[in-house]
Structure formats: structure tokens, C-alpha cells
Amino acid sequence: MGETITFRDVRHSKEIRTYINQADISLKALGFTEHSFTHVMKCAEVASNLLIKLGYSGREAELAQIAGFMHDIGNVVNRLDHAQSGAIMAFRILDKMGMCAEDVAAVITAIGNHDEGSAFPVNAIAAALILADKTDVRRSRVRNQDIANFDIHDRVNYAVYDSTVDLDIENKTFTFNIQIDTEICAVMDYFEIFLNRMILCRRAANFFGLQFKLNINGLGLL
């Protein structure tokens, strides 16, 4: 039947932490924003809290934590198809740790469906992970400190000086609020980079019967 592998087990696994760290080193070399422990811990927290507030079980919330923590390990192989690589890696790791097949299936399904190129909210954990991952937009993820040499990805992320998510169960909305310094980045630049991610967030919110809303500088744009 397998063991109950906890988030603590996963978070303290030397093997998993090694893959997360090396994946982030590879992404740094490629010029991507931060994908290390700050990012994955935030995804784990947001995804788990979302499921708890929506009435899912404590175990489902913990599986969302695990998926959030492990979702980017596939970048250690290659950025291309990293969601699928990560799901296969997670299957081997969690199976070896003794996790039951039902829990493994839930986690790897979420990991394999988090990248906007091929993602879909096929279950609650996947939907929660999508919302957590795609709303982690913040200045501190930008590694390049030379503003003069920012590409559009650096500029868009650096321009976001505040971001929050708000679940309103009564009104059935999930709102992503961001504050953008328009002297650094135009709002249109944000949409150029993140439109597909916002569409995916809308699908994920719809899975829960919620309406996804995007507010930029206090204006509702979606």
C-alpha cells in the first residue's frame, strides 16, 4: 500500500534538494529568473493554502505542497519539456521513498501539467499548482542587476514591486493583484510575456468554479 510520505520528508530530502539547486543553477546560466527554494516554497504554500480554504482534505493539501516543492526539478535535465521530465523524476523519487501509488499519481499529474506550453488543470492539485506557480511574479526573482541590459522578461518581473492573491469564496473569485512600475515596464509588455499564463490561470480557477481576475495597479483587466 505504501507509506504516508510527508511534506517534511520531501522538503528535507537531500536528493530532491540537490536536484532543485542544480536545476536553478542551469536556469541561471540560461538567463532565467530565480527558480530555487524561495520559488518552490512559495508555490508549495500558496497551492496548499488554496486547497485548504476550498475545503479539500489535509492530505490533498499536503500533496499540493509536495507537488509545489518538486514541480521544477525537471529543469535539471533541460528547460524544454521540464514539466514532463520533472514528473518522471518525481515518480522515481517518490516511489523509491515508498509513497503509495495513489499519492504518487496525484503529484506527478500536477507536475506534468504545470507548464503553460502543455498544461491543463486535470485535477485539484494541478489546478492549485498552476495558480501558485503562475502568480509568483516579483522583483526579487530577477538575477540580472544591470537594468540597462534587461531583456523583456527581466524588465517585466523587475517592474512588479508588489503582488498578492486573494480567494473570495463567497463571490467565487480568485484575484491576482499586481503593482507595476510603468516607468520600467508598460502594462502591454506584461501581457506580451504572461498572457498565456493568465489564460491558464483562468482555466485553473474555473476548475474550482471560480472566476479568475487580474488587477494591475488597481484596474481590473481580466
Image (cartoon, rainbow, N blue to C red):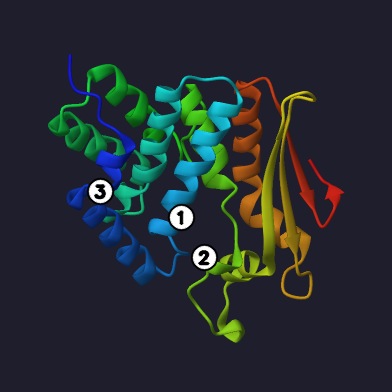
Q: Nearer the viewer, residue 55 or 187?
A: 55
C-alpha gap between disc 3 and disc 1: 16 Å
Earlier in the chain: of badge 1 and badge 2, it is 1
- Give yes or no for contact between labels 3 and 1 (Cβ–Cβ under 8 Å): no
Q: Is residue 165 left or right of residue 145?
A: right
How many numbered dots are placed on residues in this image? 3
> Residue shown at 17%/29% (left/top)?
95
Point out residue 6 in the picture as x, y percentages from the top left corner.
29, 33
C-alpha gap between disc 1 and disc 2: 8 Å
- Give yes or no for contact between labels 1 and 2 (Cβ–Cβ under 8 Å): yes
Q: Secondary structure at mark 3?
A: loop
Q: Nearer the viewer, residue 33 or 12?
A: 12
Residue named by callout 1: 39
Q: Residue furthest top?
A: 1
Q: Quadrant of residue 62?
A: top left
> Residue shown at 54%/27% (left/top)?
52
Residue type at numbered disc 2: Arg
| Mark 1, other Cα within 10 Å: few <14 / some 14–19 / many ≥20 | some
Q: Secondary structure at mark 2?
A: helix
> Residue shown at 86%/50% (left/top)?
219
Point out residue 78 in the picture as x, y percentages from the top left corner.
30, 54
> Residue shown at 68%/66% (left/top)?
161
Residue type at numbered disc 1: His
Nearest-to-viewer mark from 3 and 1:
3
Q: Please, is residue 219 above or below residue 200 in the view?
A: below
Residue named by callout 2: 141
Q: Secondary structure at mark 1?
A: helix
